[in-house]
Image (cartoon, rainbow, N blue to C red):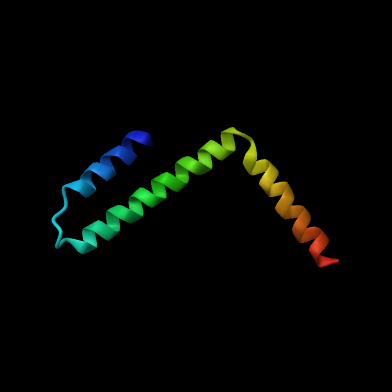
Amino acid sequence: MERLLELERYKRTLLDDEDTSSDILITMKIATIEQTLNYLMEYEQGKLHEEFNRERERIHYGRK
């Protein structure tokens, strides 16, 4: 994933200034890859389970 992110960032540097649609597409790809990497890092650190439990409790107690 990190290599794919590096490749997309490099591709962005090669774009012409006038190629706005390609820039937007690559920017979206970069953001998606970055978010996926963040999600995986949080998963490995056990933070997703903690966040799930907090959200579940908030919803459960918020309904009463």
Q: Is residue 9 above or below residue 44?
A: below
In terms of image quadrants, where is residue 16? bottom left
Report the residue at 24% width, 57% height from top. Answer: 23
Report the residue at 78% width, 54% height from top. Answer: 57
Report the residue at 34% width, 51% height from top. Answer: 29
Q: Is residue 25 above or below residue 52?
A: below
In terms of image quadrants, where is residue 33? top left
Left or right placement of residue 2 versus residue 9 in this view? right
Q: Is residue 63 above or below residue 6?
A: below
Looking at the figure, which quarter contains the N terminus?
top left
Q: Position of residue 38 (x, y in %)?
A: 49, 42
Q: Determine the residue located farthest toward the right in the rendered image.
A: 64
Q: How many marks?
A: 0
Report the residue at 28% width, 57% height from top. Answer: 25
Camera-nearest residue between 18 and 25 = 18
Q: Position of residue 61 (x, y in %)?
A: 82, 60
Left or right placement of residue 15 versus residue 64 in this view? left
